[in-house]
Image: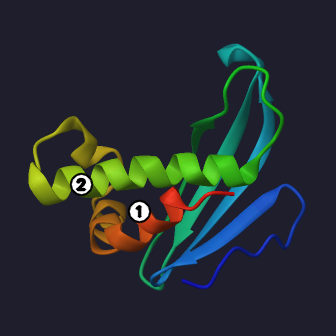
Amino acid sequence: MSGPADTVPGMFTETIGDATITVECLGVDFTQGRRQLYRYTITTADWSHTAGDIRSGVGAEPDEEEAFRTLLAFLSACAESRAYAGDSENADLFPEDVGAWAEANSDEIAILGAEPD
């Protein structure tokens, strides 16, 4: 775990295991009740996954670190589901390579997700 590196305004980057995770605020999504919309990218040497499906609460100010913690919660749910049930709806929240990575790094994901500000 290397710690956050806020290198670009509006972006948050963290390294977990062999992956770099970057979260970027895309602005306000008015179709979903004035919520901030975030894109994230998880990159390893073997694969990269990008999605833009994380949203803040209604009326929230941009907060990439909070969006990162939200992503960690989804990754944790996916990893837990894969480890214990395998057939839960959370097991396929992410593509197979991302889910396998989350399961392999579930301890570090849980620790980062539990750290207070």
- Mark 1 crowd level (few <14, some 14–19, many ≥20, 10 Å Cα): some
The structure residue drawn at horizontal position 33% and vertical position 67%, both measured from the top left corner, is 106
**Residue that badge 1 annotates:** 110
Disc 2 marks which amino acid?
Glu
The structure residue drawn at horizontal position 30% and vertical position 51%, both measured from the top left corner, is 78
Q: Is residue 36 above or below residue 64?
A: above
Tag in front: 2 or 1: 1
On the image, the x and y values in percent for residue 58 come to 71, 20
Q: In the rendered view, does 103 fall on the left or right side of 10?
A: left
Between marks 2 and 1, how big is the CA–CA gap?
10 Å
Q: Is residue 41 above or below residue 46?
A: above
Which disc number belongs to residue 80? Answer: 2
On the image, the x and y values in percent for residue 27 come to 82, 36
Quadrant in which the C terminus is drawn: bottom right
- Residue occupying the far front of the picture: 116
The structure residue drawn at horizontal position 27% and vertical position 42%, both measured from the top left corner, is 90
The structure residue drawn at horizontal position 40% and vertical position 54%, both measured from the top left corner, is 75
On the image, the x and y values in percent for residue 5 come to 76, 76
